Amino acid sequence: MRISALFGKTQRELPAEADTASHQLLLRAGMIRQTAAGVYSYLPLAWRVLQKIERIIREEMDEAGGQEMRMPALQPLELWQESGRHGVMGEILFTLSDRRDRPLALGPTHEEVITELVRHNVQSYRDLPLMLYQIQTKFRDEPRPRAGLVRAREFIMKDLYSFDVDEEGLDQSYEKMRQAYQNIFRRCGVPTILVEADSGAIGGKESYEFMLITDSGEDEIIHCSCGYAANAEKAKSDKGRVENGDLLAIEEISTPGMASIEDLAGMLKIPHNRTLKAVFYIADGKLVFVVIRGDIEVNELKLKNALNCTDLRMANQEEVIEAGLVPGAASPMGINGIKVVADDSITSGTNFVAGANKPETHVKNVNYPRDFKVNVLADIAEAREGDACPRCGEKLSSNQSVELGHIFKLGTFYTEKLGANFIDQRGESCPIIMGCYGIGPSRLLAAIIEQNHNDKGIIWPSMVAPYHVHLCPLYRDGSEVSEISEKLYTELTKLGIEVLLDDRDESPGVKFNDADLLGIPLRVTISPRSLEKSSLEVKRRSEKEVELVPQEEAITRLKELLKD
RNA sequence: CGGGGUGUAGCGCAGCCAGGUAGCGCACCUGAAUGGGGUUCAGGUGGUCGGAGGUUCGAAUCCUCUCACCCCGACCA
């Protein structure tokens, strides 16, 4: 490709829109262009990279036994009602109507479609196992698209679905995918960390995410040197024991003006973890009383899962008072008609200080279950950096990260709802066991840049670089520079090497800066200076050093360099 | 959805407070010189000032409404 003909221009100045490295560089390199919030065109350079990413993904999916296919983006809304996900996904679904007023949705994901498809094509255990995948555009009306391609509303996704006869089969499919994903990210030049995750709106029981650690990421992960790693939404910590002697009798104390745990612990000169605090939420319209040890915060996602509700928010003061509770001194003791959810930290010790449900009064020596009852007892605590690891007890670390892949064991969540059954060897009808495995090539494109750049521009890993070699002829007229660079261009291209030729009449500075910005792995400078020595200059984008290579050895040397 | 911010040429911005018919840098075009990390000089092209309505002799500027985009939060495979 000749730069003079390439569609897409580099830009010197930073676009004001962008504030993450990948977004800025994609715009500056002329690779993408925004059409609406979270909606982008991929220009030729970006498209080449995307195709290479997709090729790697295809190779790994095929290798693992996947069969590629294609499913519609346009889906009847009915399908979503049938699976019951219309509610959970409702907000994020792009919906429209056809000319007959039939409601449709633009597919945000394809579990429903594929399950329906498999239902009609699988009857017997002989038809299984099966791994089907597709790479296509998906649509999600995200509340807040951000960071360019990292969170878009229209984006590219590869999703593979596995169908097995039993759990053992699912485990095998899952393991194949996990391995394939490791290979994909390695080949794309992004180090990922595998973390336990919440399966969210997709459903199912077990899921892992592949995360890239980067400060510009929007997800927080919690991890430990022992290998424990989880999305902060899901992470656990060892809450420890708070030994405080045998159970004592309840004792009311006057606590004027002490509404927070901070105040209370200060006044009584006790650590926060010897108190119990009350927090109030409105879950699907109903007030919920949450009890948790005073030093721990509530993880709202865990709470949501414990309650199995779709809508959750904190209650305001009026709502708390209306329920007959006393903000600042609320107590789970003697509560009636209100659902009480407790974190398991309430069982981590004895003789806690808690509210008395009387203004300016607290109670000492509160013990569960002697003094109060709960409807749900679960882990609903937020694990934080510095907390003890649930596996080894060492201190947990935390990092920002971007989710690049997510693999789920779905089980029979969809197949039961949509009636996708098969006849097993004994002639009995059973729901198919399903798994699903997603990876976003367009997000991966951004992640690759996020991981591989410097202040001058992108540094493409060679497997996904839009071109292999960037030819930089300087002072093209009045010398043999032009002739030699054209010859190199032709010969390299014939060898199947992808070459970008900067055939513009620009100054060396402009060409070098653009070469750095575009980040092609190998740069070859052809100039009168080096031609005097019958040589060319070869430089790796990732290194500082320039190598002087005799003209006749140039192609051999380039081929060598491309191998590593 | 709540909070904050921004819309003026392809990109980055000034002009708005104190209304008088739009400007700077980059990019782009022409010419000349230059020649190894965004070279210089000269000349030029390009703008419904996000949109609608209003006030006014006159609106980028003042008023009202509206739309879009960005950031933080909520939310989110």
Image (cartoon, grey):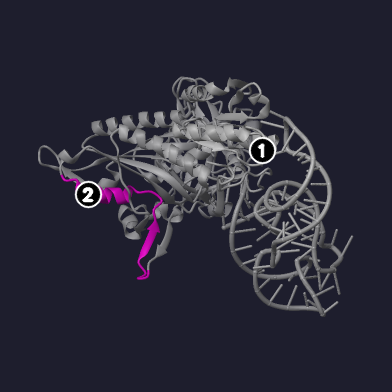
Report x, y in % for residue A429: 15, 44
The residue identified by callout 2 is A119
Residue at disc 2, secondary structure? helix
Query: Looking at the image, is mark 1 or mark 2 earlier in the sequence?
Result: 2
Which residue occupies the extreme left position in the image? Answer: A426
Question: Relative to A114, is A458 on the left or the right?
Answer: right
Residue at disc 1, secondary structure? loop
The residue identified by callout 1 is A477
In magenta, the rendered stretch is A99-123
Residue A451 marker: none
Q: Amino acid at mark 2?
A: Arg
Report x, y in % for residue A368: 44, 33
Which chain does tag 2 point to? A
Between the residue at mark 1 and the residue at mark 2, the CA separation in whole angstroms equals 67 Å
Residue A430 vs A176, above or below: the answer is below
Residue drawn at (57%, 23%) of the image: A551
Report x, y in % for residue A75: 35, 57
Let me know if residue A275 appears in the view: no
Report x, y in % for residue A60: 35, 33
Q: Amino acid at mark 1?
A: Asp
